[in-house]
Image (tube, helix red, strand yellow):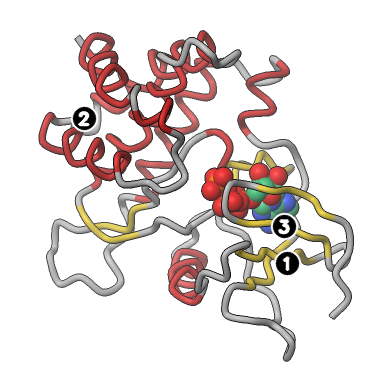
């Protein structure tokens, strides 16, 4: 397999072009992507917008995924350029969470459990000509939808309260737009927000400065949710 140009890089993975149709997503620390593969395949079959899974070459390692090559900006890029308003972004994020949470859990026997993303934020949504597509299923799990709503809210709130972030004001507006939509679907209950805080606090990718903002971020959610 010939690997082409680097198309994107997150905190944990690099994404390279293979050809016009496919990309290679590779974990930098050699994490195993096999669990994501099963989840993305299931979500795709359920009609949820995830990148299609491609043919895995013989040389692929467990940390490689061959995925449909998506075109279009991320939701974050669109918000920053002004092509997408915070109101539109809030409604879109809420819609993606709600649609995901209609899908029954794949493994769990608890009838209340649903498929969760647990890192659904504007940098993990690509706005393709066919609509938004949710990428980066590293943190996927099965559980209560309220935990997913709490994680998305907390991630936005952490940017909103970060004095060093140029995106702070935009993140606050987006959170303000998102929360009323979430309230219609059960909101962000305190126990789930507390669980989201514990998950964030254990995230090895967060810097000490980011970790220090978790409490203030959770307070902002309470304040904006009213
Ligand atoms: N299927 C795809 N087609 C085209 N570009 C993609 C695709 N998947 C990801 N990218 C690009 O690569 C970037 C990083 O991808 P991804 O979010 O999967 O990495 P990550 O390291 O898991 O991110 P994070 O920092 O959120 O953990 C995306 O922002 C996007 O620009
Ligand atoms: Mg990402």
**Where the C terminus falls, by quadrant?**
top left
Does label 1 or label 2 sit earlier along the sequence? 1
Does label 3 or label 1 sit earlier along the sequence? 3
Q: Mark 1 — residue?
A: 24
187 and 48: which is toward the camera = 187
Q: Pointer 2: residues within 10 angstroms few (<14), some, or many (20+)?
A: many
Q: In this image, 161 relative to 193: left or right?
A: right
Give the spatial CA distance, label 1 vs label 2.
Answer: 35 Å
Mark 2 or 3, closer to the camera? 3
Give the spatial CA distance, label 3 vs label 1.
Answer: 6 Å
Q: Mark 2 — residue?
A: 188
**Residue 216 in picture, x, y percent from top left:** 28, 16
Q: Mark 3 — residue?
A: 15
Instruction: Tell me if label 3 and label 1 are in contact, CB under 8 Å.
Output: yes
Residue 40 vertical placement versus 181 (above, below): below
Q: In this image, 150 relative to 178: left or right?
A: left
């Amino acid at each position: 397999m010939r690997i082409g140009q680097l198309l994107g890089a997150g905190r944990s993975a690099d994404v390279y072009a293979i050809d016009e149709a496919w990309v290679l997503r590779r974990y930098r620390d050699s994490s195993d992507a096999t669990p994501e593969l099963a989840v993305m395949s299931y979500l795709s079959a359920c009609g949820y917008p995830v990148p299609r899974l491609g043919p895995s070459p013989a040389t692929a390692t467990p940390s490689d995924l061959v995925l449909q090559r998506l075109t279009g900006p991320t939701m974050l890029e669109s918000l920053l350029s002004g092509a997408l308003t915070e109101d539109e972004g809030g409604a879109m994020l809420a819609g993606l969470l709600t649609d995901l949470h209609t899908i029954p859990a794949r493994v769990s026997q608890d009838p209340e459990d649903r498929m969760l993303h647990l890192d659904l934020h504007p940098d993990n949504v690509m706005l393709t000509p066919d609509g938004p597509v949710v990428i980066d299923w590293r943190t996927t799990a099965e559980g209560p939808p309220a935990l997913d709503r709490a994680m998305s809210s907390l991630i936005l709130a952490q940017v909103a309260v970060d004095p060093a972030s140029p995106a702070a004001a935009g993140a606050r507006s987006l959170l303000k737009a998102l929360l009323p939509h979430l309230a219609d679907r059960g909101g962000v209950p305190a126990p789930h927000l507390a669980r989201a805080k514990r998950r964030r606090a254990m995230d090895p990718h967060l810097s000490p400065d980011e970790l220090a903002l978790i409490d203030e971020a959770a307070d902002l959610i309470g304040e904006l949710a009213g």
